Image: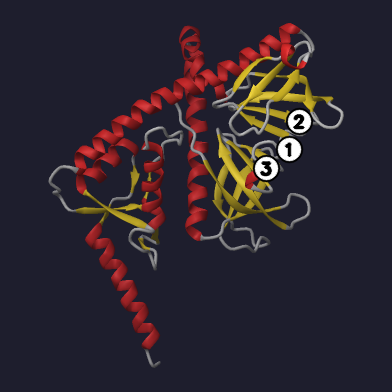
């Protein structure tokens, strides 16, 4: 019912202890921000994580001791501040927007859970919708580590936020040793396959090989399998609802495109349009794009300098823009001729300054 935005890409992060800057591959999913040395390390080799909560704050860096271009600060009430820099101003704003949308979704989820807690019967009916964003199960399992000699190593596992998180130490919440995303995963008993009692196998498209773990007893194994399947089933129900929504939005926008265009033209952020296209594409698993992010095109209430049509912004007819606005909200509304006139004025002013003999 409540969608959490997703994003991934390279950012540069300041170290927590040694204040050096290191480039990392960041992945935001289900209100968990993970980072890796490279893309190829996802998902089994994370360097760390930030479990976002509703009280987190995302802001432009204002710390005078942190001198880094395109830098944002992610403040966590329990973990203090993370300083992260992007490669450009638009990229920084994209990450700030998606992190803020995640925090807003967490706040909305908390309000919804508080409301359903008042009525136990309603709470029971709504519980399935919160499956993957709650702590479903935690406990110790033996993990099968292949090698010259197969070893079974004891690890703490936590199932929450749609992930199976593996920890070497009990007190290392932000440093999972491994993560397994549970969307599109399958799980089944594996005693007959590997000859180990109370073992089960997890398969996921992102895992190069099957992942085997072993419970202390059969009841615990069944509980783990059930909890994982409940989570994957919730994702399947969510995907089914989103597929209906994707088809409906494609149908509406295509119908508008085929009509006679009236009412003028409007500007819309190109990155937002790209995110909507990725979401609405048939067979997509991308999340909805969130509110229209035209604020990314402005600085001090006027268009940012050097914006390029097609690369930075798109122009759509009035009915298309109004339809997107009804579906997603956001803004602000930018009329094309006014917006481009302001861009031309900036360009002419810049050219005049370059040739000014003074």
Mark 2: which secondary structure?
strand
Residue 5 circle label: none
The residue at the point 37 percent across, 42 percent down is: 277
Vertical comparison of 21 with 30: above or below: below
Q: In which quarter of the image is residue 188?
A: top right
Badge 2 crowding class, 10 Å Cα cut-off, few under 14, some 14 to 19, many 20 or more, is many
* Rendering coords of residue 42 (x, y %): 64, 40
Q: Work out whether mark 2 precedes mark 1 in sequence or the reverse, and give the earlier one.
A: 2
Residue 164 place in picture, x, y as percent: 66, 26
Residue picked out by circle 1: 175
Q: Quadrant of the N terminus?
A: top left
Could you say which is closer to the camera, residue 169 or residue 148? 148
Q: What residue is disc 3 on? A: 41
Residue 113: percent from left, percent from top? 51, 20
**Residue placed under numbered mark 2 in the picture:** 167
Marks 3 and 2, how far apart at CA: 17 Å
SS assignment at label 1: loop
| Sequence-first tag of 3 and 1 | 3
Q: In this view of the protein, which residue sits in the foreground, 73 or 232?
A: 232
Where is the C terminus found, in terms of image quarters?
bottom left
Asked if residue 216 lies left or right of residue 243, the reply is right
Q: Sequence-wise, which precedes: disc 3 or disc 2? A: 3
Q: Do the residues labelled 2 and 1 touch (CB within 8 Å)?
A: yes
Residue found at the far right of this picture: 149
Q: Residues within 10 Å of mark 1 (few under 14, many from 20)?
A: some
Mark nearest the camera among 3 and 2 is 3
5 vs 258, nearest the viewer? 258
Displayed quadrant of residue 68: bottom right
Q: Nearer the viewer, mark 3 or mark 1?
A: 3
Residue at the image point whose x is 34% and y is 26% from the top: 244
């Amino acid at each position: 019912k409540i969608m959490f935005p997703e994003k991934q890409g390279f950012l540069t992060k300041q170290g927590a202890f040694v204040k050096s800057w290191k480039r990392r591959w960041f992945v935001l999913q289900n209100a968990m921000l993970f980072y890796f040395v490279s893309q190829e390390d996802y998902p089994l080799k994370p360097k760390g994580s930030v479990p976002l909560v509703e009280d987190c704050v995302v802001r432009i860096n204002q710390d005078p001791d942190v001198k880094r271009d395109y830098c944002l600060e992610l403040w966590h009430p329990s973990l203090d501040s993370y300083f992260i820099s992007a490669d450009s101003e638009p990229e920084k704003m994209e990450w700030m927007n998606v992190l803020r949308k995640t925090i807003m979704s967490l706040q909305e989820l908390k309000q919804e859970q508080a409301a359903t807690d008042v009525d136990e019967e309603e709470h029971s009916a709504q519980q399935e919708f919160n499956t993957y964003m709650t702590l479903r199960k935690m406990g110790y399992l033996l993990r099968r580590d292949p090698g010259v000699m197969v070893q079974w190593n004891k690890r703490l596992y936590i199932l929450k936020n749609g992930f199976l998180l593996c920890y070497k130490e009990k007190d290392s919440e932000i440093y999972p040793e491994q993560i397994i995303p549970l969307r599109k995963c399958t799980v089944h008993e594996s005693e007959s396959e590997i000859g180990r009692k109370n073992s089960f196998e997890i398969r996921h498209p992102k895992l190069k090989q099957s992942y085997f773990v072993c419970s202390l007893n059969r009841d615990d194994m069944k509980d783990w399998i059930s909890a994982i399947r409940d989570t994957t089933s919730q994702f399947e129900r969510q995907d089914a609802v989103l597929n209906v929504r994707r088809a409906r939005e494609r149908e509406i926008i295509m119908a508008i495109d085929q009509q006679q265009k009236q009412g003028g033209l409007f500007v819309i952020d190109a990155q937002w349009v790209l995110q909507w296209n990725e979401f609405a594409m048939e067979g997509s698993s991308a999340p909805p794009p969130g509110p229209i992010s035209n604020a990314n095109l402005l600085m001090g209430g006027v268009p940012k300098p050097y914006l390029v049509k097609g690369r930075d912004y798109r122009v759509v007819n009035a009915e298309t823009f109004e339809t997107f606005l009804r579906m997603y909200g956001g803004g602000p509304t930018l009329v094309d001729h006014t917006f481009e006139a302001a861009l031309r004025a900036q360009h002419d002013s810049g050219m005049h300054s370059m040739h000014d003999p003074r």
